Image (cartoon, rainbow, N blue to C red):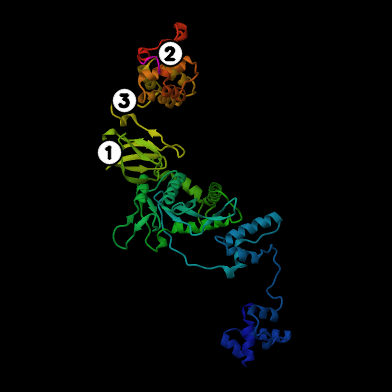
Amino acid sequence: MVRKIKAKLVLQLRAEGLSGRAIAASQRISRNSVAAVLEAADSAGVGWDDIKDRPEAEVYSMVFPGRGEHESVYAQPDFEKVHKELARVGVTLKLLHGEYLDACAAGGEPAMGYDRFCKSYQHHVLVTGLASRVGHKAGQTVEVDWSGPTMQLADAATGELRTVYLFVGCLPFSRYAFVEPALDMKQDTWLRAHVAMFEAFGGSVPRVVPDNLKTGVIKHPAEGEIVLNDAYREMAAHYSAAVLPGRVKKPKDKPSVENTVSHVATWVIAGLRDQTFTTLPELKAAVTERVAAYNAEPFQKRAGSRASAFAAEEKPLLRPLPAVPYEINRWINGRRVAKNGHITFGKNFYSVPYTHVGAKVDLRLTDTLLEVYRGHERLTSHLLAPENVVNEYRTHDADLPAGPGYRQWDPDRVRDWATRIGPSAVTVVERIFESVPVAEQGLDPALAVLRLTRRYSGERVEAACRLAVAGRVRSPRYAHLRPILETGQDKTPAADRPPGAGTAEESGGYVRGAAYYAAGGTR
């Protein structure tokens, strides 16, 4: 087995004065192998001075030229490129071998197997120790964590890059994985990622095993009770689950997700490394597609795939999801109820039962809902007004005192008020409602007319409405009636005469009063 002999060492020992027999004895190799090296070196004219600065493999080739070499029938990978690609996040020899197979198939060239591919690059392979196998029950646990490697979004206008973080969840029994891209790792993002994960699984599990991150775990002492973040505990309880964090600096307490994180780096980050994304939804779609391919990849040591094991054995055992998904919430404490029975939030107003006027209440806010609490009692709830809506009153009838004076305004209530003022006011209100496509759109214009009675008497407003109707104003409004009232046109005799009556000139002209004559006929 001359191929195993270190030819350079044999020549070095001969140069130091040892005989062939002594070299064989000291290195525990056969004298024939030593003699073969010395004869080949003498025949090739290779001495110690010629090779002392050369590597062992090159010396062997000089002594035995051509021995052990053969021309491969396989297409040779570009190992220089392989070396550069391995320096990138998430790239592995298996991923690069798959890309090599695709290139060979496209070029119609024979491709070497994965084992030969790795052996050809074996000086770059780092061998690690094995971890003991842990048995897992289906549908009992989900392990969650943030991926260390990240992705990036590029601004379409400036090209500026923004970091994208990956939330990773894994069911240990089936190894089924879930990945959610996020723009930060804050508490609300952490909780929303859990909600999205349970929705993707189609059920929940009794145990959630996270790391000891501050957005989830406040304190995890070596002895004593674990202190969880209130919001995290509330979210887990909503899905009938308990949070059981792994021990500090003990990644083997959640080995499945740790392993999945490394696979995500290969399948997602490295697999999408040559693509550029400008929006988060676009990136989410690409990540979802890559994770689906990862879950569908066949197991190496058992039948099926993560997706098939999940669908057949684990998904039927998951707990049903609650009827309403968990919503992130926050609290605003000590908000006082105004005299009109409403509290202010943002630029809008929300009713509270009138018995709590003047009291301080607490507000619980979600993305869509506002709830009002006093102590542990929930008083009422409202859908939040859209961001572009301002100065809107959202009032529940049940929050108001009994009696017609506390009813919400509607067309019938407006008509009742107009009836108490007079028939001309009724006519004006009806014309306003007829001029709008939806009756509710006429409430504010009609109320603006009727509220003139707060400044002027009902009789004057009725007279002004009569003038507007007689003047054949198609849709009398506040803008038509206010000038009549401000200038006193409603006080003229003509305003009190029925429509069609003659003017002052037609009935005999103008008659001066007694005050004029008492003053001597002067003004």
* Position of the C terminus by quadrant: top left
- Does residue 98 appear left or right of residue 288 in this picture? right
What amino acid does circle 3 point to?
Answer: Gly
**Percent position (x, y) of residue 335?**
32, 43
Is residue 360 or residue 473 the one in the foreground? 473
Determine which of the numbered discs, if any, sits on residue 405 in the image: 3
Q: Residues within 10 Å of mark 2 (few under 14, many from 20)?
A: some
Q: Which image quarter: residue 272?
A: bottom right
What amino acid does circle 2 point to?
Answer: Ala
Determine which of the numbered discs, if any, sits on residue 366 in the image: none
Of mark 2 and mark 3, the one earlier in the sequence is: 3
Q: Which residue is mark 2?
A: 494
**Percent position (x, y) of residue 409?**
38, 26
**Percent position (x, y) of residue 78?**
66, 64
Of mark 1 and mark 3, the one earlier in the sequence is: 1
Magenta-highlighted residues: 519-523
